[in-house]
Amino acid sequence: MTTPHMEAPTDTGTNVLVVSYSFSSQTNNLVQALCSGLEKEGMCIVWERLVPVQSLRFPVGTVSGTVRMMLETFLRKRIPIEPLAPVSFDHYDLLILAGPTWSYNPSGPVLSLIDRDGQRLFRDKFVLPLISCRGYWRVHWWGLKFLLRRCGAMVPNVMVFSHPNPEPWRTIGVFLKLAGGIPEKKSWLAGKYRKYGHTTMQIKEARLFGKMIGKELAEGGTELHLLNFDTTIARP
Ligand SMILES: Cc1cc2nc3c(=O)[nH]c(=O)nc-3n(C[C@H](O)[C@H](O)[C@H](O)COP(=O)(O)O)c2cc1C
């Protein structure tokens, strides 16, 4: 896959803008694969990553810092972001907005984006969200859909990827990881918790989703709502 870069969209091809935020690289890995699938189908990609004005450190590193972050994100604290590249405001056939769930909400950088640029970026556009989460995404999805529609966007579908570990180990694993631990190496957890985040199979599934979207866009893009992203690989 060629690395998507910040060139102007083409006049002739089908252009997709991907706007993403990723704290612990999980969304990034999915988006990279998604873009590779889109490119395979001949789509032209512009990928804009949201950059917080004050950089956030992953992992948070302490239990108290992790609890504070969870409380603040529950209250939908905004995380100010740097301005988008001007090319983001050009015309695109589809926008993909990708990011993690933070305490049942979109992440702070995505909330800041919607507050600041939502009307200009999303009005009258088709916007397809991609959510990376440990498993609790529905409130995030409903809230995000509401916010995007309020900006004038059309939201035909959603891609959700959940961490495949069973509960309660998944929640414990994410918390320990954020607090700076290595959950996979804790003797009492190791057998139940294989790894933080998404699997290689899920990354491949994201690439497949990219190809599905690319094929649909090549045929006019009117049936994005019919694409089935609710697979047992993406949402185990
Ligand atoms: C502050 C915080 C709150 C989180 N809250 C949720 C949540 O409510 N539901 C959920 O399923 N995952 C939650 N997660 C887990 C992330 O959504 C998950 O690890 C995701 O894959 C991270 O993606 P990223 O690496 O792109 O940031 C939370 C993570 C953080 C950092």
Image: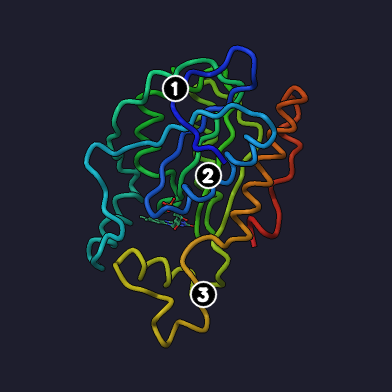
Q: Which quadrant would the C terminus be assigned to in this image? A: bottom right
Question: Label 2 near label 3: C-beta < 8 Å?
Answer: no
User: Residue 121 location, x and y as percent?
Assistant: 46, 21
User: Residue 193 location, x and y as percent?
Assistant: 50, 76
Q: Residue 34 carries which label?
A: none
Quadrant where ligand 1 appears: bottom left
Read off the residue under disc 1: 88
Read off the residue under disc 3: 194
Q: Nearer the viewer, residue 105 or 86?
A: 86
Identity of the residue drawn at 35% across and 39% down: 109
Are there few (<14), some (14-19), or many (20+) residues within 10 Å of tag 3?
A: some
In what element is the residue under mark 3?
Answer: loop
- Which marked residue is nearer to the observer: mark 3 or mark 2? 2
Identity of the residue drawn at 70% across and 33% down: 41
Question: Label 3 near label 1: C-beta < 8 Å?
Answer: no
Q: Nearer the viewer, residue 168 or 133?
A: 133
How far apart are the alpha carbons under marks 3 and 2?
23 Å
Read off the residue under disc 2: 32
How far apart are the alpha carbons under marks 1 and 3?
38 Å
Against 196, is 8 above or below? above
Q: Nearer the viewer, residue 136 or 128?
A: 128
In what element is the residue under mark 2?
Answer: helix
Are there few (<14), some (14-19), or many (20+) residues within 10 Å of tag 2?
A: many
- Which marked residue is nearer to the observer: mark 1 or mark 2? 2
Left or right: residue 71 versus residue 89 is left
Left or right: residue 150 versus residue 158 is left
Q: Which amino acid does label 3 sit on?
A: Arg
Mark 3 or mark 2, earlier in chain: 2
